[in-house]
Image (spheres, rainbow, N blue to C red):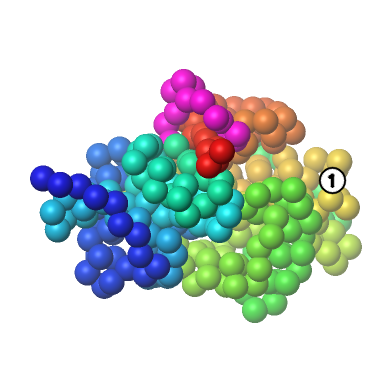
Amino acid sequence: MDASWQHTPALSAAERLEVLNLINRTEFVLGREALDETRRRTVVHGWRGEHWLLREDSEIVQYALVEGQNHATLEMCGGGFDEALLALVLELHDVVDWWTRDSDGSLENVVRTLQLLHLNLPAPEVPVPEGAILRTFNAGFDEMAWLDQNNAAFADHPEQGAWLPEDLEARIHEPWFDPSGFLILEIEGRIAASCWTKVHELHPDRFGEIYVLSVDPKFQGRGLGRVMLSQGLAALRHKGVQRAILFVDADNENAQRLYGSFGFTVEREDQMLRFSRS
């Protein structure tokens, strides 16, 4: 059978369902997510993008999504690599950053390594500092203050540091969103730190995730990262979760020390490879 890659700015209703079936089948085989959450949401919601489809005859057998223009980021369903697709994408983009999953460390052109860490619960609990208030996120009230705190904490981060109100709003309306797992720490009337947790209810193992953990730079150096990580893990445990995961850059030394002190260990590594026309 002939196989060829094609790209489209929008998936038809039939293509969207076929791609979702492909993603679900791939996740069942791999036992993990087949695409980054944001890219998966692009398919789920039928958003426009640079969608690449590999067909054998009329059947979609592989899918990839490219984001960005001159400097593009690409991920293929399952996290693999395809030289034919790379050549086609480089005809449209000067630079392509390609995310690969479950890396064995043998790849070249690596510019970023992201680690998936895991921890069996329960975990040590760290008390909330005297005078601080721990509460849950209040939708309709906390959005702008939380965005200010989070974006300041991740000012140099490629994904987390430039969230817009619509980015937060979209996640608040996701079926998995639970405000009881979105913890806010207030000090002197300001959001000093936060820990947003997520329970993967539909996964066979029903595990928890430290989705976003951040401390406002004005309040760093007080051990609030430990406090909020501890409180987030406790919140997951109270929901009956036995295992927690999180993602962290391999070269983030401060975060690595924090997570290591709680007993988190590496489950897998994902790597970003950079390619250019020249």
Residue closest to the far left? 1
| Residue depicted at x 83% and y 64% | 190
Q: Amino acid at mark 1?
A: Gln
Q: Residue furthest bottom?
A: 140
Q: Is residue 109 magenta?
A: yes
Image point (13%, 54%), residue name: 57
Q: Name the residue located 46 percent from the left edge and 20 percent from the top edge.
A: 106
Q: Is residue 159 magenta?
A: no
Left or right of 248? Residue 90 is: left
How many discs appear? 1
Nearer to the camera, 87 or 24: 87
Q: Residues within 10 Å of mark 1 (few under 14, many from 20)?
A: some
Question: Residue at left 65%, top 79%?
Answer: 140
Local SS, label 1:
loop
Q: What x and y, as percent, mark residue 205?
A: 35, 43
Which residue is outermost to the top?
106
Q: Is residue 75 left or right of residue 14?
A: right
Q: Position of residue 28 (x, y in %)?
A: 26, 44
Residue 45: quadrant of the picture: bottom left
Work out whether residue 8 can be spotted. yes
Image quarter in which the C terminus is found: top right
Measuring from the top left, give residue 214's x and y in whole percent.
71, 50
Q: Which residue is mark 1?
A: 220
The residue range painted magenta reads 101-114
